[in-house]
Each structure stands twice: as C-alpha cells, then as structure tokens.
C-alpha cells in the first residue's frame, strides 16, 4: 500500500474523477466519470465509433463519517480493445489536491490475453504537480501508475482508497456518479453507507437499487445503499452536447438539504472577506468621483478592476472555495474569480451599493442537480439587486450589462439570499452583428471594397477578445486567413477601437482589394464576394446538423444582418440576378432581398434566432433544416453577365 498523501492530495466533490476548471478556475470540483481514463472522445459517426477500451467493472464503496468527511474504496478493471486502448490504459492518472485528501493505491496489476498476471509495484506511482491546473498556483497533483507489457486484449486492474479528511464546506459532503455511454461498461456498482444521524440524502436516476439491509460488520445505527448500472453499447460524443450532469443516468448524495444551505455555507466565509478597509474606501471614492448614477459607479469600478487586477488563481486547500480578503487583492493586484468578486463587492460597498456573489458554472450545464452539489459551480460573479445587473469582474471584454456567452441562460445561486435564479438568455434585440459592405467591381472583375461591422451584446465580448488576441499577428497573415476561408485572394487591412476600452459602441472596420472574382464582359457568373467580413451567415449555413442527435446541446440566439452594396461596371451586361428568399421554422427566421438599380446591386440578408433558453434539443436541429436549405440556396445565388444561352 502506498500513501500518496506525503506528496499529493485533492479537494473533491466527486470521487477520483476528472478535474474541471472553468472560465475562472477559482471554484474547483471533481466529478466521477466511468470513462476516467479516456481523455477525450472523438465526434464520429455512430457506426464507425470504436472506443479505446471497455470497462469490465467499477465498484465503489463510499463511507461517510459523522463529521461529514468520507473515504472511498474503488475497484476498477478495464480492457484494451485496440492499439489506441493500449496507449490510453498504459498510464493511469489520478488527480487530487494536497492537504485535503490522502490517496492510497492498494493493489495494481495487468493481465495478458493469455492470462498471465503482471503485478505493478504500488511504490512506483509517480506524483507531480498537475500541469492541467490552468492559470495560477495550487496544491493539485497528479499521480501516475504505469502498467507494463500491455497489448490488445490486456486488462488492467487497480484498487485504491481515498480519505477525504477536509471537505470544501466543513460538515457537508456531496458527491455524484454518472453513467456516460462513451465506453461499454459491464458493471458499475456504487455502495454508500453513513451513520443514521448524518442527514445524507441519496437519489438515483436510471440506476437499479436503493436502500438495502446492513451487512455484517456495519455499525447498527447505519444506513446502506447499493446501486448497479451498466452500458451495453458505447456511443460517441455528439458535437456541443450538454454536460453529463444534465442528461446522463446518475446517483447523487448530499448533506445539503437545499441550495439555500449551500449558499449560506459559502456566504459565511466569503462575506467577511468582501469588506472594504480605508485604502479600498479611498480608492472607490476616487474612481467614482463625479459619477452621476449607481450604474456609472458600477461601470467605473468594474473598469478599474479589469485594468488593474489580473487574473491569477492561487489557492491551497480550502482556499479553492474561499476568496482572499479584499485588502489582500488590492495589495497584490491579482486574484481569481472569487477574489475579484470579493474585491469588487468591497469597492461597491464603499460607495453604498449592495451586491451579492452569484455562484454559476462555465461548463455546458443548464440545470442544477436535484440534490445540492458543491461541484455544480465552478465560477462566481457579482449581482447588484438594485440595478438587476450581473457583472463578471474577470471579463475584460463584455460591455456593462452583457456577459461572456457561456454564462447566458445558466442557473445561478445568489449566496446572500440563497435564491436560485436563471440568467437572461441571448436575444436578437440585444445580441447582434450588423455588417455593411460597399464594393466596386472593375472591368477586369477585381474588387475594391470596405466593410463596417457593429457588434453588440454577447457577440461584442467575443469580437473584442478576438481583436485583442489578433494584435500579436501580422496584418498580412490575418487578411490571408480571412480571405482563404472562401477561396478569395487579395490584400487589405482591419482596424477597430481599443478592445479594452468600454463605454462606446464597438465596430470593426476593413478595407480590401480582391483578385478577379468574375470574368467580364462575359458570359460569366459571379457569387457575391465575401471580402474582409465576419461572414457569420455563411458560417451558420455551413453548419450541418447531425442526422440522429440524441442529447441536448449548446446553441445561441441572436441576429446577424449583412447589407451589401456592389457597384458593377457600367459596360457590364447584367442578364440575371436571383430573387430574395424567406424561410421560417421554429426559432429560426431568414430573409434576403436582391435589388438592382442601374449598375448598383444591393443584397440584404438577415438571420434571426429567438428562443427562451440557451440550449437546444434534437427538434431544434430539425427545425433548422428548411431554413438552412433556403440560406444555402440564397448564398449560392449568382449574378449572370453577358448574353446567356
């Protein structure tokens, strides 16, 4: 038996699962996956899907103690089904956080296809810092167990025990287990035992089992559960599908009776650290001097935080769930999402504006588990009740009143009140891209043009982020990449305002010259050139829905409009222009208009998507098909020149 605690350990809400770090890796969590060793699943056709390996069994025993701590025993057996499986199973990685958990590998071995057992010395486990821990510093570690002599058909076996002696919220434990159909799984068994005096609730969904009789050796005042599940057919991951928490069979356990209790547990430790001192009060008054409204005060404070507090996550032990004190954040000028939220709250409080942390997730999850899970949240932002305004202090790009797109439509927990709310969804009224293009085609078919794109809402944050990131690339490289998307060649330049300067409408401008796009005087045909534009409508039309989607998936709403004016050569004989189209189905609406006046052609296209949620179901893809077909026909429309046969 090897005690890994000397060099590694883990903050855990699940059991020996995948560490998930979100937009701001301040709130850490771990959730159990039956496909733990599979680092990623390819999105491929179901009939071509070949998983790397199968799971013969995964048997988990969870013992919850009176003080809310727990220990977990895991017996895991897997088989390499192909060469990729040999590579996938060759290294067994176990992630955990130091100071909060002890991990023991009690036994490990492999078995060849001929039945030969090869034992793995448990003292050969290698432990190092977790390189996938994101930006910052923590005590997250990864232990690696290497199985020798593997070949196709070999099986690997590991028995381990983890002791969770320090929980994120003292006295409370919450864990979740899921059946994820990425791998064939012959048997998945979860056993849970706890003292009757511990108010642990357990719920299962599409697992067999429930409360069972005590076994010999169990304490007489205990409660025991046993659940069993399996996966007969492995299925590939579907593009953009929601997180497993939202759709996979599950077992949930929690001592939190409701989310209000979880909120209170966070608030009791975070609120004292969000208090201003004299330095913060002086700074807040200086930053907001002359502001005429609370909204303007919030904007100035948010902008100061964006410019002066850099994102950096430094958390050891339970600091992954507790912000550093606001004065400390001001002194060091860095912090993660919790720290920046606490600091912004202190600044707001100094000028008389009340606020609350809002716990939220940055994953593809749009529902809260039926039993409260500390791991349901991996991010925290600020909510200001008097303005009904959400602000993400770590987001440098979104305008006040907007948020990073991954947060729209998500459930959030307001820790000051314990209320569960749902953030607004994107909409065509607030979230849009409007592009105006002016082009002139000369007698050789070359194009000189310009474009102006106005971006608002969730799209604005993405555009600012993109323009800021592109500053490290040469203009020529950027222009070539844009033009090559649709087989165009030429030169150009782009410019925009300061991506980090808020308070003004955001526009991206471009000028360009394209190589010949049509042979004149004809007979010939010309599609509408793209030039230096975002080409969102083309990109959306090129997205092909899955034929037989099973699970809900992420999607967005908004509005995209292109207004294109083309001056054609006076001598060109225009024989034909397409007619506009109109299509509507479900949440989707598309229309276009083609109009020729003399030698000037105007084409207007607009796609609008309106829905009351930020995720889609398979029916939404079916609704999109007729609209997509109309869009593609319109985009393929060509102007005909010369005398046509």
Image (cartoon, rainbow, N blue to C red):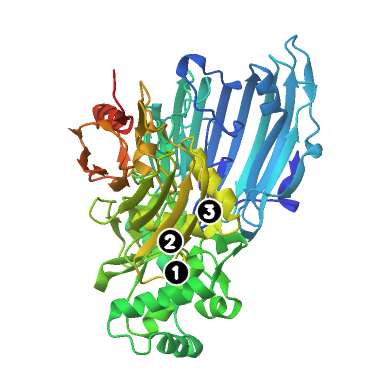
**Mark 2 and 1 residues: CB-CB less than 8 Å, in contact?**
yes
x%, y% of residue 115? 74, 11
Mark 2, mark 3: which one is toward the viewer?
2
x%, y% of residue 301? 41, 78
For mark 3, give the secondary structure. loop
Instruction: Name the residue carrying label 2.
Output: 380
Q: Quadrant of the C terminus?
A: top left
Q: Single out the residue that lies furthest toward the top.
A: 114
Mark 1, mark 3: which one is toward the viewer?
1
Instruction: Name the residue carrying label 1.
Output: 341
Nearest to N terminus: mark 2 or mark 1: 1
For mark 2, give the secondary structure. strand
Instruction: Give the number of marks.
Output: 3
From the viewer's perspective, tell me whether residue 510 is left or right of residue 409: right
Identify which residue is drawn at 44% across, 55% down. 511
Instruction: Name the residue carrying label 3.
Output: 28
- Spatial CA distance of label 1 from label 3 is 16 Å
Q: Residues within 10 Å of mark 1 (few under 14, many from 20)?
A: many
**Residue 619's quadrant in the figure?**
top left
Viewer-closest of 62 and 456: 456
Q: Residues within 10 Å of mark 3 (few under 14, many from 20)?
A: many
Q: Is residue 386 above or below residue 320?
A: below
**Mark 1 and 3 residues: CB-CB less than 8 Å, in contact?**
no
């Amino acid at each position: 038996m090897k005690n890994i605690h000397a060099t590694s350990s883990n903050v855990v809400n699940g059991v020996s699962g995948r560490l998930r770090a979100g937009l701001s890796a301040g709130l850490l969590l771990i959730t159990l996956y039956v496909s733990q060793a599979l680092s990623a699943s390819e999105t491929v056709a179901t009939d071509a899907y070949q998983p790397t390996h199968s799971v013969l069994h995964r048997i988990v025993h969870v013992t919850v103690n009176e003080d809310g701590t727990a220990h977990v025993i895991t017996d895991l057996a897997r088989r390499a089904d192909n060469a990729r499986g040999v590579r996938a199973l060759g290294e067994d990685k176990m992630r955990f956080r130091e100071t909060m958990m002890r991990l023991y590998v009690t036994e490990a071995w492999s078995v060849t296809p001929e039945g030969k057992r090869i034992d793995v010395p448990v003292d050969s486990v290698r432990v190092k810092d977790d390189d996938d821990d994101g930006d910052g510093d923590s005590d997250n570690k990864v232990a690696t167990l290497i199985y020798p002599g593997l070949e196709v058909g070999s099986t690997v076996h590991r028995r381990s025990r983890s002791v969770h002696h320090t929980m994120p919220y003292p006295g409370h434990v919450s864990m979740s287990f899921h059946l994820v159909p990425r791998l064939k799984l012959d048997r998945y068994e979860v056993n849970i035992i706890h003292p009757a005096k511990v108010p642990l609730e357990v719920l299962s969904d599409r697992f067999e089992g429930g409360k069972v009789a005590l076994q010999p050796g169990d304490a007489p005042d205990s409660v025991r559960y046993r659940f069993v599940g399996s996966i007969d057919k492995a299925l590939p991951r579907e593009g953009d599908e929601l997180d497993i928490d939202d759709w996979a069979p599950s077992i949930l356990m929690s001592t939190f009776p409701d989310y209000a209790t979880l909120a209170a547990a966070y608030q009791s430790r975070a609120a004292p650290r969000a208090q201003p001192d004299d330095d913060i009060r002086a700074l807040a008054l200086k930053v907001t001097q002359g502001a005429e409204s609370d909204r303007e005060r919030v904007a100035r404070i948010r902008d100061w935080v964006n410019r002066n507090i850099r994102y950096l996550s430094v958390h050891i032990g339970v600091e992954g769930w507790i912000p550093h004190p606001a004065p400390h954040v001001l002194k060091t000028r860095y912090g993660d999402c919790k720290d920046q939220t606490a600091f912004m709250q202190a600044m707001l409080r100094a000028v008389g504006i009340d606020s609350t942390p809002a716990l939220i997730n940055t994953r593809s999850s749009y529902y809260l588990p039926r039993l409260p899970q500390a791991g349901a949240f991996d991010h925290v932002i600020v909510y200001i009740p008097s303005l009904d305004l959400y602000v993400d202090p770590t987001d440098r790009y979104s305008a006040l009143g907007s948020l990073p797109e991954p947060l729209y439509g998500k459930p959030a927990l307001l820790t000051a009140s314990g209320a569960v709310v749902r953030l607004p969804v994107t909409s065509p009224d607030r979230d849009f891209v409007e592009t105006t293009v002016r082009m002139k085609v000369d007698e050789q078919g070359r194009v000189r043009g310009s474009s102006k794109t106005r971006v608002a809402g969730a799209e604005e944050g993405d555009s600012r982020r993109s323009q800021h990131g592109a500053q490290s690339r040469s203009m020529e490289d950027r222009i070539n990449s844009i033009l090559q998307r649709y087989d165009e060649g030429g030169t150009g330049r782009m410019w925009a305002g300061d991506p980090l300067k808020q308070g003004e409408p955001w526009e991206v401008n471009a000028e360009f010259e394209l190589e010949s796009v049509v042979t004149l005087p004809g007979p010939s045909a010309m599609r509408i050139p793209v030039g230096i534009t975002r080409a969102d409508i083309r990109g959306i039309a090129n997205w092909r829905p899955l034929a037989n989607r099973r699970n809900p998936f992420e999607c967005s709403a908004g509005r995209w409009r292109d207004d294109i004016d083309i001056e054609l050569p006076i001598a060109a004989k225009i024989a034909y222009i397409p007619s506009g189209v109109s299509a509507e189905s479900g949440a989707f609406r598309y229309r276009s208009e083609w109009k020729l006046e003399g030698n000037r052609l105007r084409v207007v296209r607009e796609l609008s998507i309106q829905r009351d949620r930020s995720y889609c179901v398979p029916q939404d893809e079916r609704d999109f098909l007729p609209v997509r077909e109309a869009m593609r026909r319109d985009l393929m429309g060509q102007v005909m020149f010369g005398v046509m046969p």
